Amino acid sequence: MTMTIRQVPVHEAVSLLPLLRQGQAFHAAALPGVFRTDRGDAELGAYLEEWLAGDGVVALAAMSDAGAMIGCAVFEIEEVAERPLLCARRNGLLKHIVVDEDHRGAGIGTRLVAEVKARLRADGIGRVRAHHYGFNTASAAMLRKAGLVPHVVTVEGDT
């Protein structure tokens, strides 16, 4: 499949909603006490516009030949201040990546991550980080294929 990847400008933030809702529904099904699905398009659109207008936040869209958005990734620049035990550094933080359910398994997520990494390298950033939930084996596999491996492991449990 031929596709293109383009940056989504702030004024088109609402175009990400169908894909982000797919990802949100998937996560809410597994963790309904964590993820919400009860917000309307107006509220979510305003949230996305405000977020994408932030410094260092970039949304990318994978577009089909027919002009449909079939995947998206949102990343931001993370500034880590120097501390007595840590070096100062800048990372890319991949916050969201979603591929339309009808297009999964075609390498779109891997191509989006490759584009995120290329843009970060062009900005002089040599490290990208991402988080995924343990139940999301598809994300884990896609991120591993894109060269991201577990580095810090977070564990959670009920009190």
Image (spheres, rainbow, N blue to C red):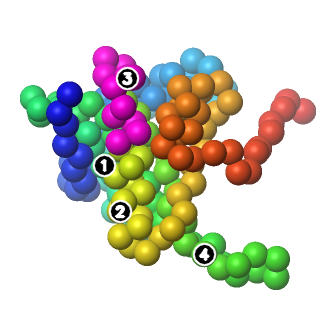
Q: Residue 136: percent from the left, percent from the top?
A: 59, 27
Mark 2 highlights which residue? Answer: 119
Q: Taking 157 as reference, is 152 left or right? A: left
Q: Who comes first in sequence, dot 1 or dot 3? A: 1
Q: Nearer the viewer, mark 2 or mark 1?
A: 2
Disc assigned to residue 25: none
Question: What's the residue type where badge 1 is placed?
Answer: Leu
Which stretch appears magenta?
Answer: 100-111
Q: Who comes first in sequence, dot 4 or dot 2? A: 4
Q: Secondary structure under badge 3?
A: loop
Whether pointer 4 and pointer 2 mark residues with C-beta atoms closer than 8 Å, the reply is no
Q: Who comes first in sequence, dot 2 or dot 3? A: 3
Quadrant into which the N terminus falls: top left
Question: What's the residue type where badge 2 is placed?
Answer: Arg
Q: Who comes first in sequence, dot 4 or dot 1? A: 1
Residue name at image x 54 percent, y 63 percent: 127
Q: Secondary structure under badge 2?
A: helix
Mark 1 highlights which residue? Answer: 60
Mark 3 highlights which residue? Answer: 104
Mark 4–mark 2 Cα distance, whole angstroms, equals: 17 Å
Quadrant into which the C terminus falls: top right
Q: Is residue 148 part of the magenta span, yes or no? A: no
Q: Quadrant of residue 131?
A: top right
Mark 4 highlights which residue? Answer: 89
Q: Secondary structure under badge 1?
A: strand
Q: Residue 86: percent from the left, percent from the top?
A: 75, 75
Question: What's the residue type where badge 3 is placed?
Answer: Arg
